[in-house]
Amino acid sequence: MKRVKHFLLTFSLLLPTLSGGAQGVADATFLELTPDAQSAGMAGTGLAITDNGSTAIFHNASTIAFSQDVMGASYSYADINKDYALHSVSLFYRIGREGKHGVTLGFRHYKQPSFDVNDEKENDILNFHPHAWSLEAGYFRSITQNLALSLNLRYLQTKVYPNTDSKGTVCLDFGATYHRNMSILDEMASWSIGFQAANLGRKLDGQKLPARLGLGGAIDLPFSMENRLQVALDLNYLLPSDYRHFQAGVGAEYNFLKYGVVRAGYHFGDKDKGVGNYGTLGCGINFWPIRADFSYALADKDNFMHKTWQISLGVVF
């Protein structure tokens, strides 16, 4: 309990310095885009999945405490609606022989479609891409054998016009995961419940960040040493009044013949306040220590995720 009290005290001291006050000028909703192909192939689920340590900082960093890997890194690229691009890099390291605590880092760069900037005589002088980026660091720790907590601190910056100053702000995420093993058909299965309070912080140029409360569950069912099924469900509630709504994602991942992976999922959302409904497909190869993943969104033409595809390359040890 002392560890829990110490962790929550740190959280409570940081929160007042990050909440309130307006800065910035651009939209920070890119923080709600799924940056990695594994999660994207499962409709963005990731709050309770414990085998995505190298990208967990973008979902729920506390899940890393239950990872089987000591360290890892990942790069992901998303081509969104043919006109938008999202690059992300992340890594983690579990400290000590038992790996009960550790650190994780992440970086995201989001680029919007370009436009021409004209001078007073309407001559084109510059082709400019509005863009945003975020840099984040997180700390996770096992509080008990089955419970872990995490805290992420993030700085994000946007630039929407070439002759204006970049705008920035800070925010934080708080995560918790409860994980248990269980025996099914002589195989060791597991289930997890994850919680995250994300994007809590200062406004960006008078606009509220996409603060979110999320609750997720996942179950991992191994049928043999080479085949297993993982099913995940995430429920999220967006807090800002301008686009307050519930959204959900359900996804499944099947590992076969030890190295192959196929995924599918469905995202439920409100198209008037965010991204609407769409399906996802994905695949991957896990050839330790390297893994490669691909995902594709099955979305209507009027959906922001239309023709969106993502790739991820990672290494774990």
Image (tube, rainbow, N blue to C red):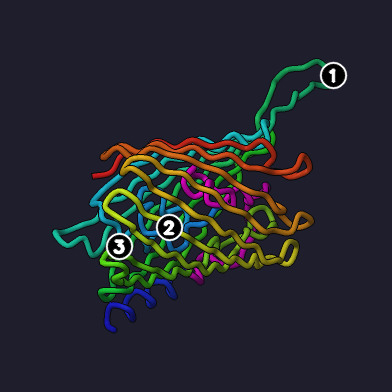
* Residue 125 image offset from top left, x and y in percent: 73, 17
Q: CA distance from mark 2 to mark 1?
A: 56 Å
Relative image position of residue 246 (x, y in whole percent): 67, 66
Residue type, numbered disc 2: Gln
Residue 256 left/right relative to 241: left
Residue 122's label in the rendered image is: 1
The outermost residue toward the front is 185
Examine the structure image and report whether residue 41 is included in the region drawn in magenta. Answer: yes
Question: Which amino acid type corresponds to the residue marked 1 in the rendered image?
Answer: Glu
Q: Earlier in the sequence, mark 3 or mark 1?
A: 3
Q: Quadrant of the N terminus?
A: bottom left
Look at the image and say whether residue 31 sits in the magenta stretch: yes
Q: Tell which of 115 and 303 is nearer to you.
A: 303
CA–CA distance in space, label 2 to label 3 = 18 Å
- Element class at badge 1: loop
Residue 73 position (above or below residue 42): above
- Residue 159 in sight here: yes
- Which-is-in-front pick, marks 3 and 1? 3
Residue 75 seen in this snapshot: no
Q: Name the foreground residue: 283 vs 244.
A: 283
Q: What label does residue 230 carry, if any?
A: 2
Disc nearest the viewer among 2 and 3: 2
Q: Where 10 falls versus 63 (above or below)?
A: below
Which segment did they paint magenta? 15-42
